[in-house]
Image: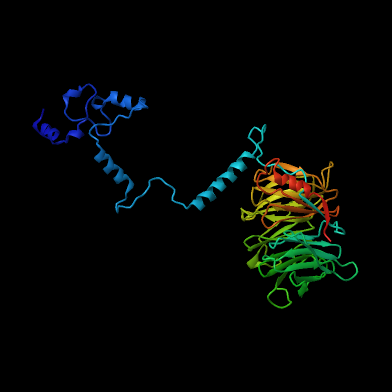
Amino acid sequence: MDQSKKRAVQLQPDWYSPRRLHDSPTQYEFPGDRFIPNRSLMNLDQAHCLLTNKVKEVHKPNFGKGYRAMLRESLTLDSEGRPFRMLVFRGSPKSRRKWNYVIDDMRRDADAEVLSNGTKQHESRRLPTKEVKVLDAPKIKDDFYVNLMDWGRNNVLAVALGSALYLWNAENQEVKKLLEVQGDNDYPTSVAWSEKATTLAIGCMKSKLQIWDPETSKCIRSLGGHQSRIAAIAWNGHTLTTGSRDRSIINHDVRVGNSPTSRIKAHTEEVCGLKWSSEGNVLASGGNESSIYIWEASKMSSSNFLHRFNAHNQAAVKALAWCPYQFNVLASGGGTGDGCIKIWNIKKGTCTHSIETKAQICGLEWNRHHKEILSGHGYGNSGVQNHLCLWKYPSMTKVGEINRHERRVINLSQSPDGLTVVSAGGDETLRFWEIFGPPRVENSASDFENLLSLKTSLIR
């Protein structure tokens, strides 16, 4: 071999020289490649004993108690001598419980989904077969276009019966008559609690609009601007938005004088549905001409709307509901000529789902505890009418339906905690349902108590 080549080989470190396959283990004194283990240097008998012996622990005799104590101290203390644990989630116990609840909810949602082959469905929740309470609601107007009921954050249900408006306290079951509208053929056609439930707005058949204080039972404001009945009311902070048969939408700032801050005329027929988004930056309005308009709060004018949807087949759009966990998602329901629930992506301006229910849709309520939406129905085809129907979201598969009203469902509203839904029917009853709560335990004491409460009681 050339002398220069010999010198280059001698300068290489021992670990650099790879052992050839045909070389014997005793030919070189170095242990082999630093990445590929050398089996000839392994104690295979001891390794086999360590893997198979479950009773007796085999320790290398060179590792004494002192060495193990130093190793344990090094692994459990940081560089500054403070104890630490490796690969441990450092969130508080409260935050860990929160994520456990989220995982449980996700598991329940997954269990309720239909399998891809369509042959089996697991449901962790069942719809109640009966209401938990029934209240008489005499003289309630059986009118598709009106919005006669609202459940406020103070846990008080406001409902208009004929020319009078009543307050029912869900905590103590007390009933209070707040007002009675004077005048021929005049009566409340829409009611809505303010966001903090300190005041109640009431719109009437003869275009009267008033704000009442429920504590003192006094009218604190009277607002004008409309020329016909006010069918829809929606609050957004200090802004009170109303929709009327005169085809206009008016925004009032209740902190200032009796003058509308803006008036919008885009609908060609009666405005019967109004809903502000939970963030308060977008308003959805539905009209009798089947149109849905989406308005930005900062740019509201008759010609400046964000979207206009005309997909409800020439049927009135009264039922509107914003999704509580996807802020850009809106659900809408069409009247008798349409009978479809449509889910809209407001950000993209597209319809993501369209479900045919074969019945008039009078109300929609999202479940805040599970990914579901409840629909209340009126006139329908093929005997399907006057019922409540629960839908899984986003698949929009039907969970089940309840048919207890003898006439159509006029309005829906849910309790502040989101566990109970009340339906107002043309059969002059208010029926309370525990639909949105967590899974109920069969044959529990609460079921027995609920059965005892299924008696009809007068609201007045």
Residue 410 seen in this snapshot: yes
From the top left corner, tell me how far across and down residue 200 is, in percent: 74, 67
Residue 273 seen in this snapshot: no
Looking at the rendering, in which quadrant would you find the C terminus? Answer: bottom right
- For the point 83% across and 51% down, which residue is it? 408
Is residue 194 found left or right of 206 in the rendered image? left
**Farthest-out residue, right:** 184
From the top left corner, tell me how far across and down residue 313 is, in percent: 78, 50
Q: Using the image, determine if residue 68 lies above or below residue 187.
A: above
From the top left corner, tell me how far across and down residue 84 is, in percent: 36, 49
- For the point 13% across and 36% down, which residue is it? 11
From the top left corner, tell me how far across and down residue 354 is, in percent: 71, 46
Q: Nearer the viewer, residue 163 or 375?
A: 163
- For the point 79% across and 47% down, which residue is it? 387
Looking at the rendering, in which quadrant would you find the N terminus? Answer: top left
Q: Using the image, determine if residue 223 lies above or below residue 176.
A: below
Is residue 458 found left or right of 16 in the rendered image? right
**Farthest-out residue, left:** 3
Q: Using the image, determine if residue 77 lies above or below residue 295.
A: above
Q: Quadrant of residue 308?
A: bottom right
Count up the numbered dots.
0
State how the image is colored.
rainbow
